[in-house]
Amino acid sequence: MTTSKVSLEQLKSKAAEWTREPFDEETRMLVQEMIDRENDELTESFYKNLEFGTGGLRGIMGPGTNRVNKYTIGMVTQGLANYLKNNFSQLEQISVAIAYDSRNNSKFFNDTAARVFSGNGIKVYIFNSLRPTPELSFAIRELGCQSGVVITASHNPKEYNGYKVYWDDGAQVISPHDTAIIDEVNKIKSIESIDFLGNPELIEELGPEMDENYISMLHSLSLNPGTIMEQKDLGIVYTPIHGTGVDLVPAALERYGFRNVYTVPEQNDPDGNFPSVFSPNPEEKAALDLAIKRAESVGAELVMATDPDSDRVGIAARGKDMKFVLLNGNQTGAILVYYMISQLHEKEKLKGNEFIAKTIVTSSLLSEIAGHYSVKTYEVLTGFKYIADLIRQKEGREVFVVGGEESYGYLAGDFVRDKDAVLSCSLIAEAAAWAKSQGKGLLDILDEIHIKFGLFKEHLISIVRKGKSGAEEIASIMERIRNSPPVSLGGSDVVMINDFLKGQSVDLISDLRYDITLPKSNVFQIITQNGSIVSIRPSGTEPKIKFYFSVRENVKDKASLEAAGIRLEERIKRMIEEIGAK
C-alpha cells in the first residue's frame, strides 16, 4: 500500500459510505471488494474528489469519489443546478443544453444529468443522438441557455469519461464560476439529496434543425466559394476516429462545396472502445494511419481526423514525393491564420480592429503573421476557455478573426465559443483548395510562411506520472525547475523568466520585475537570448507534466529550409537534455 495505516483507515471509512444504500447494488459490491483487498485501486478511487481542471471534470470510469460514475455526475450536476438557481434567480425559467460523445456510458451520463437538472426545475435541451462539442456551444447561444454540459473525455483512453461545463456565452466555465460550482458540489453531503428521477416534462429533444442552423453559420465564414467551385474535386479523406464528427464534418464539407470526400469505413461507427486505434488522439500519427492508407488508395490530397468529441483536428498533406506529411498543431494553426488574414486583407475586409488569440505555449509564428497585417495578437493561458473569455471581453469593440492552440484546436468567428473541428475541417479544406488554385499544396504554403516570417520548430514532451504518487512527483519537478531555473539553454543565455503562478516576469538582464496580467496558473516559462522558449506546466486534465520547446531561425529562401530545420532540431535536443525533460 502507498498510504499509511491512518490514511488507509480514512480511505476505508470514506469508501464504506458507498457500500450502503442509496448506492446501487453493483456499486456497493464493487466498493466492498476494494475495501476487502486494501489495494491501490481503493486509494486511487477514494483518495480525493474529482476536481475541475482546464477541461472540466475528467477521470477513469468506475465507483468512487475520484471516478466518473452516476453519483459523481449526479453530485456535480446538483452542484451546478444549485449554482444556476442562485445566479439566475431572477429568471422565470432557467435552461441548459447537454450533448454527449461516443464514449462508453456517455449516453447514460447524459440522461443522468438531464434528469437531475429537470428534477431541480431546470429546462433541459438534449440532442437526439451524439453531437460534436462545438455544436453544444452553438446551441447554448442559439437557445439562450444559462449553461450547458458535454459528456466527453476528448481524446483520452477508453477507460475515461468526463463532464465539461459551459456558461451562458457558450464558453467553458472559468473563475470564479468553476471553483464556485465545486464549492456547491462540496456542500452536498448526501446522495439522497439528488433527484435522479427528474421531470420528463422539462426535457426537450434537439434534432436536425439545430444541425442545419449550425452548419449554415459555419458556411458563412467561407472566404473563397468561387475557388472551391473551381476545385470542388479536391480529394479529401476524413475520419471521425469512431467519434461524433461522422455526420456533421462531411455535411459541412459538402455545404462548403467539396464533392470528392471519402471516409474511412473502419472508423465511421461511433464506438467508445475505439477498436481501430490505440488512442483516438489526432495528435498521434497512428490515429491517422488508416486515413492515410485510404487517401493513398483513392488518390486524395488531404487527410483530416477529428477526436471523439470533434473539437480538435489533425491533418496530413501530400508532399513533393506524393507521400503524406503530418502537420503539427502549430503548423496547421499558422496556415489557418495566414489563409484567413491574408485573404481578408486581399479582399480589403480588415477594418483595423481585428485580433487573433493564442495560448502562451502556442507558436509565436501566429503572432508574426498577424502583426504583418497589422492584426493584434492576444495571448492567454493554456485552455481554449481563456480564448473564449477574451472574445467575450472584446465583444462589441474588437473583432475576433481566428485563434488556436498547439494541441490541434482552432476557432474562427464568434458564434461558437470553443475550439471547433467541424469548422476547422471546412476552413482547412478551403485553404487547400486555395493553394491548389495556385498550383501549390498546403506544404508549399507552409514553406512560404516560414520564408516570410521565420522558420519555427516546436516540440512537446509529456511525462506521464499516474495516481497520487505521480501527482507528487509532478509537483516535485515543477518545484525543482521553479527554484533552480537554468542560466542557459541550447547555447543561449536565459534572459527572461515568466512565472505565471507567482504572476511575475523577471528580466535577467536588467533585473527588473513585471506583473503578469493573466490569471495565476502553474506554468513556468524560460526565454533565451536567441528567442528560444521553454514552457513547463502540469496538465489540468491528465496525469502529465508537459514541456513545450519552441525555437526559431530566419531563412532567406526555400533552399535554406532543410539545413535550418536540422540546426533547430539539434538545438531542441540539447535543450531537452539540459532541462532534464525525461
Image (spheres, rainbow, N blue to C red):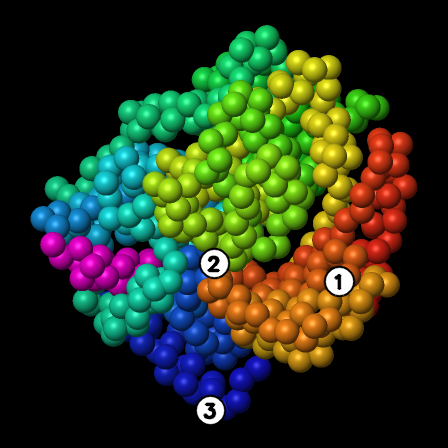
Q: Residues within 10 Å of mark 3 (few under 14, many from 20)?
A: few
Question: Foreground residue, 195 or 170?
Answer: 170
Question: Foreground residue, 367 or 352?
Answer: 352
Q: Residues within 10 Å of mark 1 (few under 14, many from 20)?
A: many
- Front position among marks 3 and 2: 2
The numbered dot on residue 6 is 3
Q: Amino acid at mark 1?
A: Thr
- Quarter of the image where the C terminus is located: bottom right
Q: Is residue 337 visible?
A: yes
Q: Amino acid at mark 2?
A: Thr
Marks 3 & 1, CB-CB < 8 Å contact: no
Task: State the separation of the CA atoms marked 3 and 1.
Answer: 48 Å
Residue under the point 62% across and 54% down: 361
In terms of secondary structure, where does tag 2 sit? loop
Q: Residue furthest left?
A: 92
Residue 529: horizontal and vertical position, in percent? Answer: 77, 61
Q: Is residue 2 above or below residue 464?
A: below
| N-terminal-most mark, 2 or 1 | 2
Residue 339: horizontal and vertical position, in percent? Answer: 60, 28
Residue marked by disc 1 = 528
Residue under the point 21% across and 52% down: 117
Q: Amino acid at mark 3?
A: Val
Q: Is residue 183 above or below residue 95?
A: below
Residue marked by disc 2 = 54
| N-terminal-most mark, 3 or 1 | 3
Residue 185: horizontal and vertical position, in percent? Answer: 29, 67
Task: State the separation of the CA atoms marked 2 and 1.
Answer: 28 Å
Residue under the point 31% across and 29% down: 210
Q: Which residues are magenta?
A: 67-90
The verdict on residue 377 being magenta is no
Question: Foreground residue, 4 or 217?
Answer: 217
| N-terminal-most mark, 3 or 2 | 3
